[in-house]
Image: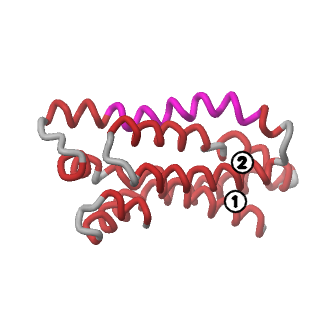
Amino acid sequence: IARILALSYLCLLVRITNYWPMTVLPLILRYNLNVQSDQSVSNYLSIYFSSFYYGGIVGAFVWPYITNHLSKRNCILISLTLQGAFNTLSGCFNKFYLICLFRFLIGFSYNLNTVGKAFLLEICEEPYQQYAFTIEMCFSLFGVFVSPLLGYKVYTYTGNDYKTTCLY
């Protein structure tokens, strides 16, 4: 149970890290990156959000090969470390293409859908695997649910400063 809860908590943290900008990204574009027209904001939003998923597509093909050489546990720890580092680095730049590059790398390093699921299958006996997936999914969905509000609160708390918000 402790391993399932630990992995579920990691899924929660990953969701919060990845979904916090949803509500504040238009504000970040206007106030921190000086994008003023509504059409440009819309274009930038689509590029920003799709860059994460493009990275996820590439990572879905790469992480299985990495797990052949490292344990699943180490892969999960490496993934989380990379995501935290790339999220922090994305706040260090005011260039949109660099922020999208880091979003791509965050998506690439997000391996809990592939490696994390296989890790759950290893640590759970067969009759309890559905419960383990349910617990993990509840934590993940709670992260998706709470992260936009959390992102908005932190962004406004830091005085609409994108760099400081990424450090939180």
Tell me which amino acid carries mark 1: Leu
Q: Which mark is residue 161?
A: none
Q: Which mark is residue 116?
A: 2
Label 2 neighbour load within 10 Å: few <14, some 14-19, many 20+: many
Q: Which one is earlier in the sequence, the residue at label 1 or at label 2?
A: 1
Tell me which amino acid carries mark 2: Gly
Q: As drawn, is 2 to the left or to the right of 89?
A: right
x and y percentages locating residue 136 in the rendered image: 64, 56
Magenta highlight: main SS: helix
Q: Camera-side residue: 81 or 149? A: 81
Secondary structure at badge 1 equals helix
**CB contact under 8 Å: marks 1 and 2:** yes
x and y percentages locating residue 30 in the rendered image: 18, 47
Q: Is residue 47 magenta?
A: yes
State the extent of the magenta-drawn residues as a range: 46-64
x and y percentages locating residue 48 in the rendered image: 37, 37
**Gap between marks 1 and 2 measured at Cα:** 8 Å
Q: Which residue in the rendered view is the most extreme toward the left?
A: 37
Residue visible at 48% across and 58% down in the picture: 16
Q: Camera-side residue: 116 or 133? A: 116
x and y percentages locating residue 106 in the rendered image: 53, 44
Q: Specify the quadrant that holds the N terminus.
A: bottom right
The part of the image, by quadrant, that contains residue 105 is top right
Q: Which mark is residue 7?
A: 1
